[in-house]
Amino acid sequence: MTTAGLLAGIRVLDFGIWRPVPYATQLLAEMGADVIKIEPPGGDPMRTFPELFAILNVGKRAVAIDLKDPEQREAVRGLAATADVVIEGFRPGVAGRLGIGYDDVRARNPATVYCSVSGYGQSGPMRDLPGHDLNFQALAGTIAPRVPGGEPVVGRPPVADLAAGAFAAMAISAALVRVARSGEGDYLDVAMADILATWTGPLPEIRRADGQPMGGGAAGYGTFRTADDQWIALGVLAEQPLWRALATTLGLAELAELSFAERSDRMTELNTQLAAVIGRADRASLVERLTRAGAPVSPVREAGELVADPQLLARGVVRRTADGATEMTHPVHYQEHPAGRSDAVPPLRHGVAALPAWP
């Protein structure tokens, strides 16, 4: 095993602020890429949230550049010409007006992988509209009410930001393979709304093997409140052994042999029965009993509990730092070329003189 990540030696020039582009380049940096972050004269606005900025930017190098200044812009263009990857998160057309667009970079280096990350993409009637994560989720239907007449449901993670960053990193990595084989670069147009829309629909109506519609869920699939005002999640679908383990453990043995079709037809009734039993026991004992029986159960964690979860600690997803703090690590394990994460937050240097050079 080598300590060099899979992208060791890859040079990335990052023109992103806030979260989507920095998250993409953080993933690349953890896989070994050398990332130089170009920030506006006042710095990335995310620096006003130091802990979040650190999560997204450790291990990079950063310099504030005024791209409207001809001398500073030309220096950055020279750096871009020697990069393997250039990624930006401006509104469509802005990078080109600043002289650092795809055509500008490609003219100097046709092998460059150039990635633009935006809310609505580089084309279409909404391309120029401003927005943030919630706007793109709304357009894609991610926060649509779960029941007719309900209210929109906004999840805790900024899904559009993180999805865009992850997809950008994936697409960049694929494009780099193409460069290695053919010497040909590419332009990648990553739109947050596009990605989420492919997740949300339209999906065909789900039907059982007998042709009957599934309806709005399944018995034993959902979240349930426990007696100590906590929550558990159950994940039973069609698998008979999982339903049998759940029903038997909860003292509902008379329901244990119901088929999936029968459970689907009686979903509301059965979930009401499950909720009544679960509501009389505490979360810890329920999770222990159901886990031992082989039922698909998990506690609904709060953030403070998550960092102490034995599974995540065992996987190394949660790491203790030298000063005793906890942090999340790269989410993929690579056997031969493991990802790594620096603890060094890049200080903000200013001007052309502070521009770093590639190794």
Image (spheres, rainbow, N blue to C red):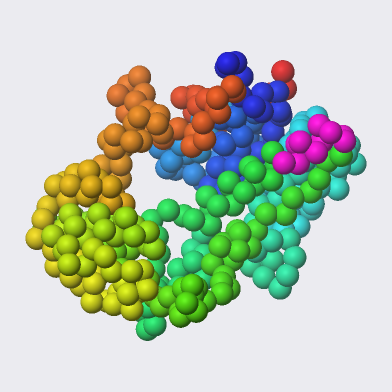
Q: Is 148 or 243 nearer to us in this picture?
A: 243
Residue 291 at what x, y percent from top left?
A: 25, 45
239 on left or right of 164:
left
In the depicted structure, whether residue 100 falls above or below residue 225: above
| Quadrant including the C terminus | top right
Magenta segment main secondary structure: helix
- Residue for point 48% across, 37% down: 331
Residue 39 visible: no
- Residue for point 23% across, 47% down: 293
- In the image as oriented, which residue stretches furthest toward the front? 257
Q: Is 61 or 311 nearer to us in this picture?
A: 311
205 on left or right of 223:
right
257 on left or right of 357:
left
Question: What is the span of residues highlighted in magenta in the rendered image?
Answer: 174-183
- In the image as oriented, which residue stretches furthest toward the right? 107
- Residue for point 75% across, 36% down: 176
Residue 105 at what x, y percent from top left?
A: 83, 41
Residue 224 at what x, y percent from top left?
A: 23, 62
Q: Quadrant of residue 31?
A: top right
162 on left or right of 359:
left
Residue 294 visible: yes
| Quadrant including the N terminus | top right
